[in-house]
Image (spheres, grey):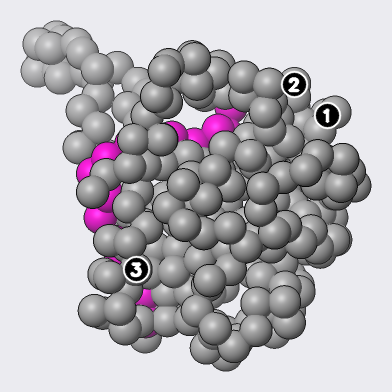
Amino acid sequence: MKVLILAGGFGTRMSEETHWVPKPMVLIQGKPMLWHIMNIYSAQGFNDFVIAGGYKVQMIQSWVQQFELPWKVTVVDTGESTQTAGRILKCLDLLGDEQFLMTYGDGLSNVSLSSLLDFHAHYRKTITVTAVRPPARFGVLEIENGVVTRFGEKNQADAGWINGGFFVVEPRIRDYLWSETQVLESDVLTPMAERSQLAAYMHYGFWAPMDTLREKNQIEEWAKMPIPPWSATVV
């Protein structure tokens, strides 16, 4: 089964790093974020990757060509201005008429891919998304009559569920794709949800995005651990 990684965005919220490299190529303990994501899949038996590049795609291509990676990797230049769903559209010929896995090039998780696939097979929808709790980022105030009665960290569970990537996708996604200007979330997942074709696998384990420099630095710290939290797969 192939794994599609969406790796073409500009990463503007991390301009300190992405001015020089595409976000999936930002180094975490000496290896690109992309390597860490691919290793999550490889550790669970998935070794055939299609990378949908765009912004500074030549850097991803050079990395794949320069290093003897232990996986089959195909890099597709989907264009800098192409939107997320458009990137999928431009990779369909490589993905063929089979089910595939998909994720973004900036998120890490210890999700069990076998459990995700079992869940997807049970519900039989066009796409299953891994739903996660977003990391708590802000202090929370409880206020009565203008006086703070409690100040503390926001409970992660209070934030609800969000799209954490790590999708399972059926080839009939083709029916929802027609333009490189389509955005995955608003132009594909939203209408799928309206037609009851989007399932959500709730993942209670580790998940972390790399949208900001602060998040990148936190991932760096985790990566120093003997077993980083995204490497301890939830069974």
Depth order, front residue of 211/68:
68
3D distance between C-alphas at marks 1 and 3:
37 Å
Give the extent of the magenta segment.
Answer: 197-212
Q: Which mark is residue 141?
A: none
Q: Is residue 206 magenta?
A: yes
Whichever of callouts 3 and 2 sits on the residue coming sooner in the sequence is 2
The residue pinned by badge 1 equals: 19
- Tell me the residue at 34%/68% (across/down): 117
The image position of residue 106, as x and y in percent, is 58, 41
User: Label 3 is placed on what type of residue?
Assistant: Leu
User: Label 2 is placed on what type of residue?
Assistant: Glu
Q: Is residue 143 above or below residue 38?
A: above
The residue pinned by badge 2 equals: 16
Label 1 element class: loop
Label 2 element class: helix
Q: Which mark is residue 117?
A: 3
**Does 220 sit left or right of 182 as displayed?**
left
- Tell me the residue at 35%/21% (across/down): 138
Q: Quadrant of residue 151?
A: top left
**Does 49 sit left or right of 199 as displayed?**
right
Q: Quadrant of residue 39?
A: top right
The answer to whether residue 146 of the structure is visible from this angle is no
The answer to whether residue 3 of the structure is visible from this angle is yes
Mark 3, other Cα within 10 Å: few <14 / some 14–19 / many ≥20: some
Tell me if label 1 and label 3 are in contact, CB under 8 Å: no
Tell me if label 1 and label 2 are in contact, CB under 8 Å: yes
Q: Is residue 111 above or below residue 45?
A: above
- Tell me the residue at 34%/35% (across/down): 232
The image position of residue 68, as x and y in percent, is 78, 43
Q: Is residue 222 magenta?
A: no
